[in-house]
Image (cartoon, grey):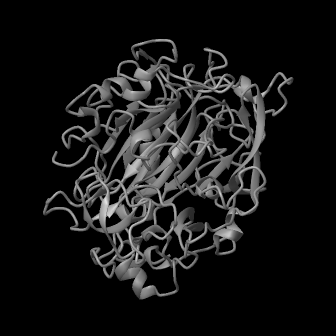
Amino acid sequence: MESEHVKGGRRTRLGINPARLCAAFAVGLAMLLLFVNPSWAQTRQPVFPGGSFCDDVNSGLCTDLASGVNYEGQYSGHDEPAVVFYSDKPGSGNSSLYLIRIPKDAPVKPKQDGTGGTWNFQLHPAFWFSMAICDSQSDPNFTNVCNPDTDANIFDNPDPTAPDFIGKHPGVSLMEFQFYPPGWSNDCFATTWCSAMTIDSLSAKESTGQLNNNDCLSKVGEEYVNFAFLTFNGKTQAAADPLARALDPNQTAGIPDPAQVLQYNPGDVLLVFLHDTPDGFRVDVVDLTTGQRGSMTASIANGFAQINFDPSASVCSSNPYAFHPMYSTSSEHTRVVWAAHTLSIAFSDEIGHFEFCDAIAFEGGPCTLAGINDPGGLDRDDRFCFDNFGDPTLIPVTACLTTERDFDGVPYLANSWPGGTKDREADEDLRPQPVQFTSPLFVDKHGHLRNYKRVAFEADIPAITSNPPCSHRTGVGCTNPPPGAQFYPIYSTTEFFDGVCGWQLGGGNIKGTINNFGGTSTAEYGPLLFSPYINGTGSITLVENNRQILNHNPCKSGFGEDDDHEDD
């Protein structure tokens, strides 16, 4: 780990004394744990607009569907390499505590011809921490009951005659606590990061193939999202309800107000706590660098709501709803059964959403003149394109954000990522610093912090690979990395700060890397994964992911007990 020696003690790269950071961690943790155990002391587009956003623009901010297409038959895959955390102890599925370092951008600004530096907005419109959430109106809609925080919700047996048949799973959503980079048209702010809670649900009933009524499909889409920025006072700017957002002409919920929304500077270290409360699932953040903090609760008071699943209705309706975690533990069996990924407790990056375009028809429209990434001319992923809206505070580049189909955009180039090559000078001048985070801790039934026991690397590469050549039934033609990609990012371990292990995302050559798990996506994400999914009244086995499970956690946090520590 790079460091500098100063009078009064050794400092981290951030200029923070490790002892002081540990003390700040302890203070921040004490504040957050009060919520667990009370005895412990606008000229731009909205970041997440209302309407049928996931269907209409193939947003990189939406959960990837197992089917790979939306209700209109359009491709809707999202590239999401993830590191997943497992434990069989209660609490591991409904609470997780992370440290995360917000990455800095390259010193050199991006240029339209691709010769400049790479900034975070080019690599990922967001990265996120996740958790499976109860939603009794979401797919598979077998029952309208979902009792939260229990492994009684695990239904992943492919046998239709089994009591735990996957088709009987209670309605489930995926919560993604997302971080958004600055600098371009899809940012929160020009120079600072922000974050939001998103809860993705699916209006479908797998056993019958029914979707919701046409009014709901036209207003909020098949996959709808409760959305709320993390704020200083924990109150939403406007209702998180997908229907309310769709009907709001001002898009109040999707445009961040700097007076309300917590902002992060590049390089800040955050303490992030995901946990349940009586009012709803909650995220608390303490910025250990600036001392600022904020929160968001998926509560009725904050306008969170379900879209009622009523295929026969003529008018779409929503129901105020407090969302709570789905499971008690975290394992291969705690899934969002309609999603491509098989995870719950995880960190994931959203990549594959930036390709240079030299001219556009209009903001959000198609590319009319191919950029440097498409030397052969325009192709099918040159859609949903933007420039910097003439805003002088933003980087003056034009690009398209639709999910890559041929894997030739900026996120699939080795010279875009930190550690993508062995050129250290390029890393320092032309590439952003990697996002870094610790393995989460969870709160067990005694209120103790524990490490997760196992880790998995999972990438939904087959799900995002067009069919053909990749057969989702047999796995034939499914390659890792995806066809056309010159590079695919991987997770490695490093020293987060002195004596504390952390994860980072990029290439296998990031300065300070301890373990890069083989150094390639082929080695890290491992073999094809065959998983059961609902298929009418039966099931079907599909290949949606590559996954490698380690039988241990190679990057435990030093602040918690081991997972296998005996219960009292």
Give percent across and percent down for residue 248.
25, 27
Quarter residue 19 falls in: bottom left
Q: Would residue 48 appear left or right of 163 to someone viewing this image?
A: left
Does residue 558 lie above or below 203 as drawn?
below
Q: Would residue 368 appear left or right of 461 to someone viewing this image?
A: left
Quarter residue 319 falls in: top left
Q: Nearer the viewer, residue 435 or 416?
A: 416
Question: Going 39% across and 79% down the picture, which residue do you hit?
Answer: 5
Question: Going 64% across and 34% down the picture, which residue do you hit?
Answer: 91
Tell me if I can see residue 448 in this picture. yes
Q: Would residue 440 appear left or right of 49 to someone viewing this image?
A: right
Q: Quarter of the image for the C terminus: give it.
A: top right
Question: Going 48% across and 75% down the picture, which residue do you hit?
Answer: 413
Does residue 145 lie above or below 245 as drawn?
above
Quarter residue 358 falls in: bottom left
Give percent across and percent down for residue 6.
35, 77
Q: Would residue 355 appear left or right of 444 to someone viewing this image?
A: left
Q: Nearer the viewer, residue 25 or 72?
A: 72
Does residue 475 lie above or below 521 as drawn?
above
